[in-house]
Amino acid sequence: MRSDSGPAGPQQDAAAEVLGALVQTSYAVVDAVAAIAARHRLSLTLWRVIAILRDRTPMMSDLAEHLGLDRSTITGLVDRAATRGLLVKTGDPLDRRSVRVRLTAAGQDLARTCAAELSEALSPVLRRLSTSEQEHLGQLLDALDVTG
């Protein structure tokens, strides 16, 4: 059924173009991440955990909430990664009931390796932009704040 609102205006056309470009770009990024994760025997969820843990030591419950996982799922994921020597669980000195999780040295090394491989995989795409365009793109993506 056709709406009587008339044809899409220029603003809707621009938004559709941006959305299309954003979706296509996200596919390229996900493909690169998936290939690198597979090379290192990581699920995409474990990749996200490792990326999160690069600069913080969250409580398991906060990590589960951030990833949209239930506690039993995050516990299994963390336990399997701990068996591989990638991360460890530690007690929270302020709350003995809470458990924090952090990367081991091997986990940090893997995080650095994966980040370097991703940078290498995506650099041909980014090189199409000038330095100022890359900075502007970063600002625009930050403004979208998809994590918050």
Image (cartoon, rainbow, N blue to C red):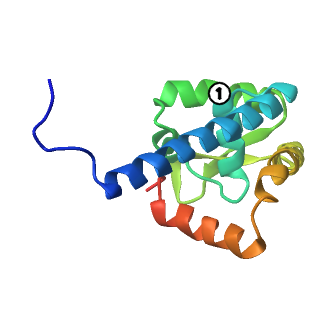
Q: Could you say where residue 49 lies in the image, as x and y percent from the top left?
A: 66, 41
Q: Residue 14 falls in which quadrant of the image?
A: bottom left
Q: Residue at the left extreme?
A: 4
Q: What residue is drawn where x is 65% and y is 27%?
A: 77
Whether residue 133 is visible here, answered yes or no, is: yes
Q: What residue is drawn where x is 78% and y is 31%?
A: 37
Position of residue 12 in the picture relative to residue 129 (left or right): left
Position of residue 113 in the picture relative to residue 69 (left or right): right
Q: Residue at the bottom extreme?
A: 132
Q: Is residue 125 above or below residue 77?
A: below
Query: Which kind of residue does numbered mark 1 sit on?
Result: Leu
Q: What residue does disc 1 label?
A: 77
Q: What residue is drawn where x is 80% and y is 29%?
A: 35
Q: Residue at the front extreme?
A: 7
Whether residue 112 is visible here, answered yes or no, is: no
Q: Is residue 62 above or below residue 34?
A: below
Q: Could you say where residue 86 lies in the image, as x and y percent from the top left?
A: 81, 38
Q: How many marks?
A: 1
Q: Could you say where residue 44 lies in the image, as x and y percent from the top left?
A: 67, 31
Q: Quadrant of the C terminus?
A: bottom left
The residue nearer to you, when weighing 137 against 88, is 137
Element class at badge 1: helix
Q: What residue is drawn where x is 75% and y is 30%?
A: 81
Q: Is residue 15 above or below residue 27?
A: below
Q: Could you say where residue 70 lies in the image, as x and y percent from the top left?
A: 46, 29
Q: Quadrant of the N terminus?
A: top left
